Amino acid sequence: MANTIGTPTVTRGLHKNLNGAFSEVITASAAISDQDAVAANDTTTFSMTVAGAAVGDMCAVAIDNDLSDGTDQCAVTATVTAANTVGVRVHADVGEYAADDLNNATVKVLLMRPAW
């Protein structure tokens, strides 16, 4: 099975930051286990099950992998696509992003529910 991501570790709670701008903050991380090549100007999406994620949550994403190694280059974004589901998108923007280059990379997402 290609383009798979492991079961994430999820932390939920009310974090007292940014003067109460967020009513809930959720963090999750998971490892990518199998990634197909991503053609130039194409996108691949990994779906992460994140308990408590809701459409409208703000997302930030980080990955512990070099996204530009001289020949491969990509951008990574995240959005809540449905309740309890975060889509992590990998977009190859220069040339084809090599198959398996993201294997074993850890994806970390931060979800913030606006309190306003």
Image: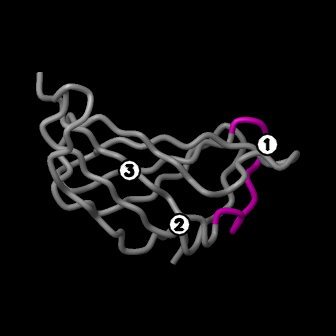
Q: Residue at x 28, y 45 (%)?
A: 81
Q: From the top left corner, tell me how far across and down residue 36 is, in percent.
A: 63, 64
According to the picture, the residue beneath numbered tag 1 turns out to be 95
Q: Residue at x 46, y 45 (%)?
A: 61
Secondary element under disc 3, as helix, strand or loop, is strand
According to the picture, the residue beneath numbered tag 2 turns out to be 3
Secondary element under disc 1, as helix, strand or loop, is loop
Provide the residue span drawn in magenta.
93-102
Local packing at callout 1 (Cα closer than 10 Å; few below 14, some 14-19, many 20+) is some
Q: From the top left corner, tell me how far across and down residue 32 is, in percent.
A: 53, 68
Q: Residue at x 56, y 45 (%)?
A: 43
Q: Report how far apart the C-alphas of labels 3 and 2 lie in the structure.
A: 12 Å
According to the picture, the residue beneath numbered tag 3 turns out to be 87
Q: Is residue 31 magenta?
A: no
User: Which image quarter is the C terminus in?
Assistant: top left
Callout 3 amino acid: Gly
Q: From the top left corner, tell me how far across and down residue 62 is, in percent.
A: 52, 48
Q: Quadrant of residue 64?
A: bottom right
Q: How many marks?
A: 3
**Nearest the eye: 103 or 42:** 103
Q: CB atoms at circles 1 and 2 under 8 Å apart?
A: no
For discs 3 and 1, the disc positioned in front in the rendered view: 3
Q: Is residue 94 magenta?
A: yes
Q: Is residue 55 left or right of residue 75?
A: left
Numbered badge on residue 106: none
Secondary element under disc 2, as helix, strand or loop, is loop
Q: Report how far apart the C-alphas of labels 3 and 1 lie in the structure.
A: 22 Å
Q: Residue at x 63, y 70 (%)?
A: 103
Callout 2 amino acid: Asn
Callout 1 amino acid: Gly
